[in-house]
Image: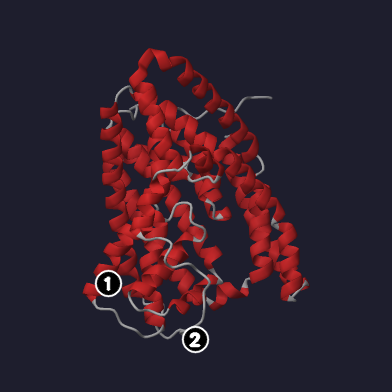
Amino acid sequence: MRSQRLTMIIFIGMILGIAVGFACNKLWPDPQIAKSIAGYISLFTDIFLRLIKMIIAPLVFTTLVVGVAHMGDTKAVGRIGGKAMLWFVSASLVSLLLGLIMVNILRPGDNLNLPLPDVGAATNLNASSLSLKDFVAHLVPKSAVEAMANNEILQIVVFSLFFGVAAAALGERAHAVVEIIDQTSHIILKITGYIMALAPIAVFAAMAATVTTQGVGILVTYGKYLVEFYLSLGVLWLVLAGAGFLFLGGNKMVRLLSLIREPFLLGFSTASSEAAYPVTMAQLEKLPVSKKIISFVLPMGYSFNLDGSMMYCTFATIFISQAYNIPLTIPQQITMLLVLMLTSKGMGGVPRASLVVIAATLVSFNLPEAGLLLIIGIDQFLDMGRTATNVIGNSLATAVISRWEGEHADEMVPEPQPQAAD
């Protein structure tokens, strides 16, 4: 019941934020004044996200180390990791292919009633920052402390895996250390609960600041593109739900969808995967999924299983080619899909990651990088949908792998009943 109340309050905060943003945009139409006002409003969101980032590194480290240590042997780690990567690669291919199919069917770039940016216009994005070589080198941290200080999730995962496997190999001698880390994880989760109480305020501020500067008019201008992208996301949601019904069964999938409403809405309204991460962990435990599976699979998913972001990469790239009337053949599009399959794995931890990946892809296929300027203005609204989809994909992946491992209890954990009186 408490979770449902928080979900409702977050939704109300989002609606009120849009209304306040609209009023501010009308009262102060000057872009500079609106930007200044939005800066003060977004201070609440910035504080919330900083608090979330404050706990992400210790939360991932403690839960993952305990989860791996409790598995007891490296074979279990390899087996679960292999199953996770099999799911992530399959889901990535489906997401990229679906984005490719939908953008070719809907063709949002045709007859675009917008002025096209000059082909030589600069986007100020480093298109070369996501090469496969750099990504592989970036996997291993130079320093565990530096990785945690910079919230490099994938590097933290690598270090935590080494630490957890070593602790498991030492057995009883490492028991005291694992127990301390386990208790620390519970403290971090308690802190998470305090921080999440601020989520409705953060959501309100995020929406108000965005609409204050952009105005609701931008949604009308880019209405066709936004509607068709969210329609494509809706198709992906149905595909993911169908996979869930197939692998989990109807009852468990319905329960999973019910449980992830809160992290879904939080991810959507803040456009922050980090904000949704702690809540997703807590909700998956109620499914129930074992902590060791959650703490192992979910952090990996944040680097390797970004379904919404990957769908957007193919969707946006082909959209730009359509807008500039530069047709791509089917073989070229399939090649693009395979290239994105590799380069998109470097998304985690890169600012404006989807845009950077798309910029690199545009350069590789001789498409005008300036086409990104068509979508940068509404990227916040697009990122909301991508992030929410990533929450669904990672929740489903964790639940399915738990079922494959036999860690998914058959009995449902009953929802706590409301008390007659406080």
| Res. 208 image quadrant | bottom right
Which residue lies most toward the top here?
172
Q: Residue at x 54, y 55 (%)?
A: 271
SS assignment at label 2: loop
Residue tagged 2: 118
Name the one closer to the observer, 157 or 113.
Answer: 157
Residue tagged 1: 333
SS assignment at label 1: helix
Which residue lies most toward the front here?
142
| Res. 79 image quadrant | top left
What kind of residue is marked 2? Asp
Q: Is residue 286 visible?
A: no
| Res. 229 image quadrant | bottom left
Name the one closer to the observer, 56 or 141.
Answer: 141
Q: How far across and how far down the image is residue 133, in percent?
A: 34, 56
Q: How far across and how far down the image is residue 153, in percent?
A: 47, 44
Q: Is residue 36 visible?
A: yes
Name the one closer to the observer, 288 or 118.
Answer: 118
Q: Residues within 10 Å of mark 1 (few under 14, many from 20)?
A: some
Q: Residue at x 35, y 79 (%)?
A: 366
> Disc 1 to disc 2, how far (Cα)?
24 Å
Name the one closer to the observer, 152 or 18.
Answer: 152
Q: Earlier in the sequence, mark 1 or mark 2?
A: 2
Q: How far across and how far down the image is residue 402, in percent?
A: 33, 34
